[in-house]
Image (cartoon, helix red, strand yellow):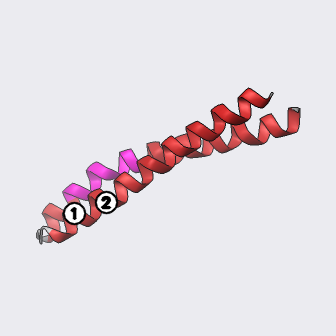
Amino acid sequence: MEYLIWIGAVVTLLGLAGLIWCILKVQKARKKGLDDSALKAELQKVVALNLGALFLSVIGLMMVVVGILLS
């Protein structure tokens, strides 16, 4: 089950990269100096990607834990 651990680690890192990308996108939107409604619209676009990246990261961590328990 060692392969499950490594695959889970890669999936977790992809999710973490997605979370970092979301953080950078929000920082860039804040630096633009948009008004409240425009900033809210930009943040709503990022929320779905943020949740997807978080889900990917959690699935990867679950794969690692299952791989450790089965080995």
Question: Which residue is rendered at x = 20% and y = 56% of the image?
Answer: 41
Mark identifier at residue 1: none
Quadrant location of the N terminus?
A: top right
Q: Name the residue at 79% across, 36% down.
A: 66
Identify the residue at horizontal 65%, vertical 36% (top origin).
Answer: 8
Residue 28 horizontal/vertical position (percent):
22, 63
Q: Which residue is mark 2?
A: 24
Instruction: Give the prevailing secondary structure in the magenta stretch.
Output: helix
Looking at the image, residue 27 sits to the left or right of residue 64; the answer is: left
Residue in the image at 36% along x and 60% along y: 23
User: Vertically, is 44 above or below 35?
Assistant: above
Tag 1: amino acid: Lys
Residue 63 shown left or right of residue 28 in the figure: right
Q: Which residues are magenta?
A: 41-50
Toward the viewer: 65 or 39?
65
Residue 10 is covered by the magenta coloring: no
Residue on which the image places disc 1: 28
Query: Residue 71 lies in what quarter of the image?
Result: top right
> Which class describes the residues within 10 Å of circle 1: few (<14), some (14-19), or many (20+)?
few
